[in-house]
Image (cartoon, grey):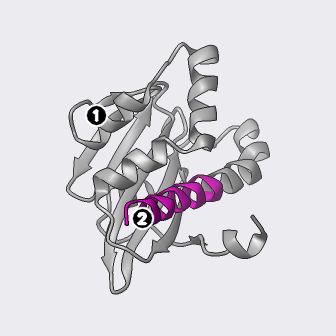
């Protein structure tokens, strides 16, 4: 996997009226990434693929051992099918047809997924919001130090979800 492939994941602003956009206020950190896949993908397929990539499974394992927040692929499927609202360290904060926003158990970060139909396929969005503990406070030094890692990790999560969806397309023909 070279940088050329990762360049297919682009940084962008959260779409207008998206669930993530409301966190785009001063004092919060918000990022948003988009990648296009050349097939029609349902939101449920995207959510399930995202939370079951090998990279996200590593995060799930860490959460299981360090935060006692275990999760399974079955729960990822249930989350993607709107059957549950809790998954690992997150709770669904808001959900509409093609997007959802989840909040971590400490109420400091939000993760957001969205799809949008495109001419030649589907746009896959992934974004995050980090909210200071107190309104008007600044984000901590640890977050600032880890920002580069967070951004690369976000790009990789979206990249691997797209790759997983692409492979599923080829094996189902």
**Would you identify the image quadrant in which residue 143 lies?**
top right
Depth check: 116 or 134 in front? Answer: 116
Q: Magenta stretch: dominant SS?
A: helix
Kindly report the distance in space between the C-alpha atoms of the residues bearing marks 1 and 2. 21 Å
Residue 21 point in image, percent of width and height? 38, 61
Marking on residue 78: 1
Which image quadrant: the C terminus? bottom left
**Would you identify the image quadrant in which residue 151 lies?**
bottom right
- Image-based side of 148 in relation to 123, left or right: right
Residue that badge 2 annotates: 169
- Image-based side of 89 in relation to 114, left or right: right
Marking on residue 49: none
Depth check: 48 or 92 in front? Answer: 48
Q: Nearer the viewer, mark 1 or mark 2?
A: 2
* Between discs 1 and 2, the one toward the N terminus: 1
Depth check: 169 or 130 in front? Answer: 169
- Image-based side of 170 in relation to 116, left or right: right
Does the stretch in magenta take in 171?
yes
Residue 9 point in image, percent of width and height? 59, 70
Circle 2 Cα neighbour tier, 10 Å, few/some/many (<14 / 14–19 / ≥20): some
Bounds of the magenta span? 155-173
Q: Name the residue: 48% across, 65% down.
A: 166
Q: Please, is residue 92 above or below residue 118 in the view? A: above
Q: Please, is residue 141 above or below residue 72 in the view? A: below
Q: Please, is residue 5 above or below residue 45 in the view? A: below
Q: Indicate the secondary structure of the residue bearing disc 2.
A: helix
Q: Name the residue: 55% across, 61% down.
A: 163
Q: Name the residue: 75% across, 64% down.
A: 1
């Amino acid at each position: 996997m070279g940088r050329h492939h990762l360049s297919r994941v682009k940084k962008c602003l959260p779409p207008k009226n998206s669930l993530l956009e409301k966190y785009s206020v001063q004092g919060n950190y918000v990022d948003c990434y988009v990648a296009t896949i050349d097939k029609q993908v349902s939101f449920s397929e995207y959510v399930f693929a995202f939370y079951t990539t090998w990279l996200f499974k590593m995060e799930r394992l860490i959460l299981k051992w360090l935060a006692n927040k275990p999760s399974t692929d079955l729960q990822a499927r249930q989350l993607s099918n709107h059957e549950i609202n809790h998954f690992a360290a997150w709770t669904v904060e808001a959900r509409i047809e093609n997007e959802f926003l989840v909040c971590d158990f400490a109420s400091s970060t939000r993760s957001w997924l969205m799809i949008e139909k495109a001419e030649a396929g589907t746009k896959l969005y992934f974004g995050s919001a980090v909210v200071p503990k107190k309104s008007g406070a600044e984000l901590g030094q640890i977050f600032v130090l880890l920002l580069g890692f967070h951004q690369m990790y976000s790009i990789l999560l979206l990249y691997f979800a797209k790759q997983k969806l692409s492979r599923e397309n080829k094996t189902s023909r």
